[in-house]
């Protein structure tokens, strides 16, 4: 409660400051901003001296600076896209900073050479460029190793850091003891009774040693005298704090690993908590923005800068991006790759930037999505349909239209020559050739030609052996419209494969464009005889549940990727599908396959349009509209469902029959009342039960209401 009131008091204090628009810096180099934005929990060590503030403003004269500091130990994912959007754009919008005064540093937080690789460094840079963000400069934490080392020496000399030879087990035991003592104290108990001090652990043999001893050991650590894990440098913080992150964090550890950026120069490396605040100060950052799990790191962040008397940036924590039907945990994503559930880190089902790009999501889609999601401190899970709808809105205006048959059925038009002879070719076109706009809404995208041939291919979803009232596709002895031809396609005969009565080999059809023909309920798409064979990969959600649980391995969607290896596509698209123009670091050609969704050319493509050779692969980015998948139910559930349907049909039939009755005969002929009554009055209202007992006036009144209800229903139906 005390903390809440303190926090609210701090907010009120800050909100009392004047609201200033970002119109540059004043004479002291101070950039005016919205003082109510990006306010976090106050820390006693966070206050800067007047001298530090003055020096910082002199350096940052006229600008506000943020930073984006990914660790190069993996590939960026959609959560990083949100962070990029925040640090390069949204934070400045919230602060009211004008465009000329915005600066963002792109920093590799490369302090752990065991996990970092050059491929990650390269991919992160390329992803940031692809998303369109342009940093003020690109830096590396490793380029500050000399400065960080000097600061560690300073802390040792101040008695605020010491060399420690505790192993991991001892460190954990020491922290557990400190936690127990603090918990007892907060509960009003005596910590010396509940959790007595153990001099071997707390304070331990290392904490209160001399400056000279610690300088010597730290120097030996740097010179490579000790084995890995033998010694660390720890910060002398506060074991009585309620925040375990203040329990003497490790500042340096020994690692005999070559660094991907600075090579073999160092065998000791600074820890993240020691590094990132100092680097923020060195780079003159104004706002250090991170996610909420780092909120408890405020104390060590500001303590280190206070101990070194360095400028303290403002810190703001926002909620992580949590997206339905996926996971963003690096360890879980790594397991998906190792199990070969996905093709790799750039699999189109992965939430990585490279996977999303390969699937067909553009930088504009991701940036718009992140901008719409925004940045707050409220934890929430964003519906994946929000991302899908953003994709549809962005892809619709610019995607070239084309027809495709994902699962093709061959159709022979038996009257093709006759029908063709009755048609006249339009200017610049051959007979049975049609000019199709690349976009129905944007004429500037041009057009392409499609040609109806004697043999065409339909998608199997457009044909059924058994027709129904709700089905508008093709069926035996049924006609549908043929898109762009404008006339009808009539199925005369179904030819099955030898020995089968289900596997279709061929449909024999006729076409009809005569005047007075019946108007079709639908028009289906098709591809001509010279259609290009391709592989179409249709992607769905990676998981079967919106929020994967602890048993997430069992919740992986077995139909997250459906491959149509023998799909056929309109040959007019081949110039857009040249393998020479396909690149994993850019957005490749996007197409709208009519009725099937938005697709893009995949990087597995080897297609050469000059020779029509090589493999052509498409990935579905998103469907044309939201897909609702039916839940798989058991046979018992299906039987219950059918029983309910039967009851509903019976009730409907009874109601329809009742509507045809004369109201006077309701209680004589309706199945619900038949046999219940023996005598009736002139209005048809029962007066006696079947056994001869006389009905009460109340019972007769109730039956009269039922009769009136029927009369009203009949009058309403008549209107």
Image (cartoon, rainbow, N blue to C red):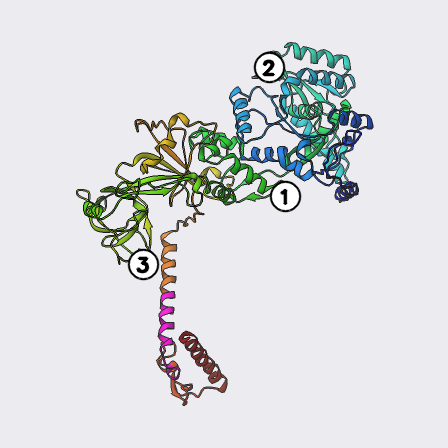
3D distance between C-alphas at marks 2 and 3: 71 Å
Label ID, residue 378: 1
For mark 2, give the secondary structure: loop
Q: Which of the two residues, 187 or 124, is positioned nearer the viewer here?
A: 124
Q: Nearer the viewer, mark 2 or mark 3?
A: 3
Residue furthest right as drawn:
50
Residue 55, position in %: x, y? Answer: 78, 24
Residue 127 in sight in this render: yes
The N terminus: image quadrant: top right
Element under disc 1: loop
658 magenta-colored: yes
Q: Earlier in the sequence, mark 2 or mark 3?
A: 2
The residue closer to the viewer here, 154 or 408, is 408
Q: Mark 2 = which residue?
A: 262
Q: Are marks 1 and 2 in contact (CB under 8 Å)?
A: no
* 114 is higher (above) or lower (below) than 490: above
Q: Give coordinates of residue 297: x percent, y percent.
A: 68, 31
Q: Residue at x 77, y 29 (%)?
A: 29
Q: Which residue is mark 3?
A: 469
Report the side of 435 relative to 46 (left or right).
Answer: left
Quick one: label 3, few (<14), some, or many (20+) residues within 10 Å? few
Q: Examine the image and state in which quarter residue 307 appears.
A: top right
Q: Residue furthest bottom?
A: 682
The answer to whether residue 497 is above or below residue 216 is below
**Of discs 3 and 1, which sits in the foreground?**
3
Secondary structure under badge 3? loop
| In-front residue for pair 25/262 | 25
Q: Residue furthest left?
A: 498
Q: Is residue 377 left or right of residue 621?
A: right
């Amino acid at each position: 409660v005390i903390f809440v009131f303190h926090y609210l008091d701090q907010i009120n204090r800050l909100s009392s400051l004047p609201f200033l628009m970002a119109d540059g810096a004043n004479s002291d180099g101070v950039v005016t901003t919205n003082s109510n934005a990006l306010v976090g929990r106050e820390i006693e060590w966070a206050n800067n001296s007047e001298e530090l503030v003055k020096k910082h403003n002199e350096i940052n004269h006229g600008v506000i600076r943020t930073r984006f500091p990914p660790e190069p130990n993996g590939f960026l994912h959609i959560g990083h896209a949100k962070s990029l959007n925040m640090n390069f754009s949204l934070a400045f919008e919230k602060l009211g900073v004008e465009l000329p005064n915005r600066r963002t540093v792109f920093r590799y937080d490369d302090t752990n050479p065991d996990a970092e690789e050059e491929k990650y460094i390269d991919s992160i840079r390329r992803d940031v460029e692809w998303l369109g963000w342009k940093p003020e400069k690109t830096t590396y934490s490793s380029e500050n190793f000399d400065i960080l080392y000097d600061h560690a020496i300073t802390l040792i000399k101040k008695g605020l850091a010491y060399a420690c030879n505790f192993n991991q087990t001892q460190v954990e035991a020491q922290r557990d003891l400190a936690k127990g003592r603090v918990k007892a104290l907060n509960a009003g108990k005596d910590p010396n009774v509940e959790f007595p001090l153990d001099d071997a652990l707390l304070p331990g043999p290392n904490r209160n040693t001399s400056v000279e001893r610690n300088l010597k050991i730290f120097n030996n650590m740097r010179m490579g005298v000790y084995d890995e894990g033998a010694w660390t440098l720890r910060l002398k913080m506060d074991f009585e704090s309620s925040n375990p992150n203040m329990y003497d964090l490790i500042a340096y550890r020994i690692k005999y690993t070559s660094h991907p950026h600075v090579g073999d120069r160092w065998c000791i490396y600074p820890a993240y908590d020691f590094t990132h605040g100092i680097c923020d100060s060195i780079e003159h950052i104004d706002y250090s923005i991170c996610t909420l799990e780092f909120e408890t790191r405020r104390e060590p962040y500001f303590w280190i800068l206070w101990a070194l008397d360095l400028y303290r940036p403002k810190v703001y924590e926002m909620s992580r991006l949590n997206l339905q039907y996926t996971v963003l945990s690096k360890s879980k994503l790594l397991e998906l790759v190792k199990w070969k559930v996905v093709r790799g880190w750039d699999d189109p089902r992965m939430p990585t930037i490279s996977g999303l790009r390969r699937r067909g999501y553009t930088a504009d889609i991701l940036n718009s999505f992140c901008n719409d999601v925004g940045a707050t401190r409220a934890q929430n899970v964003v519906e994946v349909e929000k991302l899908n709808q953003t994709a549809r809105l962005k892809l619709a205006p610019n995607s070239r239209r084309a027809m495709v048959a994902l699962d093709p059925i061959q159709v022979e038009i038996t009257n093709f020559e006759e029908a063709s002879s009755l048609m006249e070719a339009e200017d610049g076109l051959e007979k049975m050739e049609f000019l199709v706009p690349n976009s129905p809404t944007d004429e500037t995208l041009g057009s392409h030609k499609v040609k109806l041939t004697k043999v065409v291919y339909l998608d199997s979803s457009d044909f059924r052996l058994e027709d129904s009232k709700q089905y508008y596709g093709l069926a035996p002895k049924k006609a549908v419209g043929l898109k762009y031809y404008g006339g009808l396609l009539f199925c005369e005969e179904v030819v099955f494969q030898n020995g089968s009565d289900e596997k279709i080999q061929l449909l024999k059809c006729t076409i009809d464009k005569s005047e007075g023909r019946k108007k079709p309920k639908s028009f289906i798409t098709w591809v001509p005889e010279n259609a290009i064979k391709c592989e179409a990969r249709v992607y769905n959600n990676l998981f079967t549940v919106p929020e994967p649980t602890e048993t997430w391995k069992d919740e992986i969607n077995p139909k997250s990727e459906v491959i149509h290896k023998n799909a056929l596509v309109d040959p007019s698209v081949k110039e857009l599908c040249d393998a020479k123009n396909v690149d994993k670091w850019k957005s490749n050609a996007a197409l709208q396959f009519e009725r099937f969704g938005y697709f893009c050319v995949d990087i597995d493509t080897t297609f050469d349009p000059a020779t029509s050779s090589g493999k052509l692969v498409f990935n579905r980015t998103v469907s044309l509209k939201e897909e609702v998948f039916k839940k798989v139910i058991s046979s018992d559930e299906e039987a219950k469902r059918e029983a309910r349907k039967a009851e509903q049909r019976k009730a409907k039939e009874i109601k329809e029959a009742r509507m045809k009755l004369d109201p006077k005969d309701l209680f004589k002929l309706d199945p619900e009342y038949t046999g219940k009554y023996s005598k009736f009055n002139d209005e048809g209202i029962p007066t006696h039960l079947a056994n001869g007992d006389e009905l009460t006036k109340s019972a007769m009144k109730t039956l009269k209401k039922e009769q009136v209800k029927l009369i009203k229903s009949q009058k309403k139906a008549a209107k």
